[in-house]
Image (spheres, helix red, strand yellow):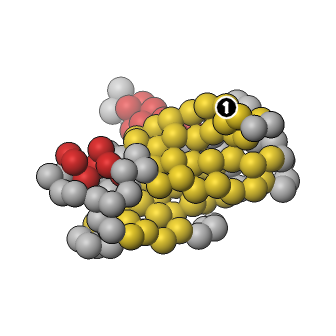
Amino acid sequence: MKVIVPILLASLSFSVVAAESANPLSVHILNQQTGLPSKGVVVELEKQEGSEWKHLADAVTDDGGRIGALYPSGKDMSVGVYKVTFKTGEYFSGNKQETFFPEIPVIFKVTTVNQKLHIPLLLSQYGYSTYRGS
């Protein structure tokens, strides 16, 4: 029994890592003022369809400020224009701080099906920076 439990835990950990590594989209938020990850931030994913935005998913950053698998599981991320919106107003309000940016939308273009993309956000109360990560 003692041998089975570690093996079972190891296989569960591997399953989570495999699912995240197979997912085409991840995000990460670092608070520039504190130098710490921004945990508890709601992040929404949408895809542009004509002049409308279609909601695909939302998730909350973990203790490390990450969402390792933001794209809906089991679906291919097709070519097109997408938007990730970081709900920073709620995050700063929860930390009893004001912010100039209650939401930070990042619009990006996918040029290859299931292209592996990472969108990091460097955040402060009155500014932010983002780029295409790996």
Neighbours of disc 1 within 10 Å: few (<14), some (14-19), many (20+): some
Which residue in the protein does label 1 denote?
54
Residues 25 and 89: in front is: 89
Residues 6 and 52: in front is: 52
Q: Give the quadrant of the C terminus.
A: bottom right
Q: Residue at x 25, y 53 (%)?
A: 92
Q: Give the quadrant of the N terminus.
A: top left
Q: Residue at x 22, y 57 (%)?
A: 98
Counting from the top left corner in percent of width and height, residue 71 is at 63, 40
Tell me where residue 55 sits by quadrant: top right
Q: Residue at x 75, y 49 (%)?
A: 81
| Left or right of 51 on screen, residue 87 | left
Q: Residue at x 63, y 39 (%)?
A: 46
Counting from the top left corner in percent of width and height, residue 79 is at 83, 47
Q: Amino acid at mark 1?
A: Lys
Residues 54 and 60: in front is: 54
Rendered view: 63 above or below 1: below
Tell me where residue 109 sits by quadrant: bottom right
